[in-house]
Structures are given as C-alpha cells and as structure tokens.
C-alpha cells in the first residue's frame, strides 16, 4: 500500500479512483478486485502488484473518504458547530456508499495514512471547544442521525432539520 508517509504511487491513485467510481456508481457489491482491474483495463493479478487484497483496496477508498470529510468539516469550523454538523451530514448523504464503508465496520487504523483519523476528528473537537468527550458524543449523535437517515429509518414526515437542531442545542457551549 502507501509508504510510511501515506504517499500513494500513481498506479495506486488510479486504482483508488477506479474503486471509488465503481462504489459510487454501482454500490458496494461492485467493489471487487476483478471489477477494479476490468475498469483499469488490466488483469486482476496485475492489480495485486499494487494493492495486496480487498481490504487494502477498500482502505484506499476509506482514506480518500476521510480526507474529503475532513476537508469539508475544516472549512465549516469558522462558522461554528451547526456548520460542522451540516458539513458532516451533507458529505454522508452525498456519498452514502463511501460513508458506510468508512463507518459501518471496524476501522483498519493500521492501514490508514498517519494522522488522517486525527485530522478528521479535529473539526468536531474544535466545534465543542476542545472537549474530547463532547466531541465523541457529537460524532455519535451525527453518525446516528446520518445512519438513520441513510437507512430511511425516520418516518416520511419527520422534520430532520428540526431533529438536528434539537440535538445540536445540547452541544452548544
């Protein structure tokens, strides 16, 4: 995979882009080594020279997702807690397959680029004044709300904006 600094080779970047496109366009069942190889016009065994297994392939997509989410939330920090929460929600709803891959299974921290998880958590920490326990509670709230929304678990007439606002009030400093 990436070297110790988290730097990908050009071929790994191409593989990550192909995997992401398949996931976004066709969902999680399309994310296979064979499909990614086909999308790149190569044979599956050639893919293994650059990405050792499906876990590593998924981690490339997960890392990209975390970097995108971090960027979205970082840009919202100056506007405060509601903006950070909205950036989180907007990203998850716009990229549901990536979001689920990032959050619905154990996180392979050992395969992520160094510092990426911390970078993604920092805007949540900033939004609650640096209190780590409150930042974790905020993440749990945002993840729960987004997950229920993605899985269509709220009644059709539910006012989700009002629910978000009510929940975020408890995090106001």
Image (spheres, rainbow, N blue to C red):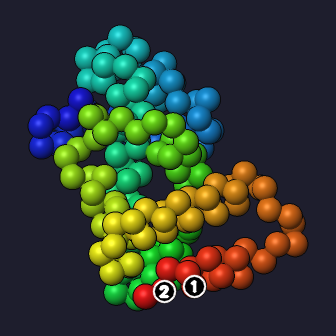
Q: Crowding at label 1, few (<14), some or many (≥20) Cα neighbours within 10 Å? A: few
Q: Residue at x 51, y 37 (%)?
A: 105
Q: Badges 2 and 1: C-beta atoms under 8 Å apart? A: yes
Q: Secondary structure at mark 1?
A: helix
Q: In the rendered image of this protein, does residue 68 appear above or below residue 171?
A: above
In this view, the residue in front, 98 or 115, is 115
Q: Is residue 14 visible?
A: no
Residue corresponding to mark 2? 172
Residue 66, image x and y in percent?
A: 38, 53
Q: Residue at x 31, y 52 (%)?
A: 117
| Viewport quadrant of the C terminus | bottom left
Q: Residue at x 64, y 55 (%)?
A: 147
Q: Crowding at label 2, few (<14), some or many (≥20) Cα neighbours within 10 Å? A: few
Residue corresponding to mark 1? 169
Residue furthest to the left in view is 4
Residue 46, image x and y in percent?
A: 31, 15
Q: Secondary structure at mark 2?
A: loop
């Amino acid at each position: 995979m990436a070297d110790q600094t988290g730097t990908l080779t050009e071929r790994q970047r191409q593989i990550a882009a192909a995997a992401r496109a398949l996931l976004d366009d066709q969902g999680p069942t399309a994310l296979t080594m064979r499909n990614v190889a086909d999308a790149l016009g190569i044979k599956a065994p050639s893919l293994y020279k650059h990405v050792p297994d499906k876990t590593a392939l998924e981690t490339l997509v997960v890392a990209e997702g975390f970097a995108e989410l971090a960027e979205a939330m970082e840009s919202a920090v100056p506007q405060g807690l509601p903006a950070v929460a909205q950036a989180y929600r907007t990203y998850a709803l716009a990229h549901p397959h990536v979001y689920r891959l990032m959050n619905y299974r154990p996180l392979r921290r050992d395969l992520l680029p160094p510092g990426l998880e911390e970078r993604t958590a920092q805007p949540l920490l900033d939004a609650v004044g640096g209190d780590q326990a409150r930042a974790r509670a905020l993440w749990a709230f945002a993840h729960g709300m987004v997950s229920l929304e993605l899985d269509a678990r709220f009644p059709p007439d539910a006012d989700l904006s009002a629910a978000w606002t009510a929940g975020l009030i408890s995090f106001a400093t």
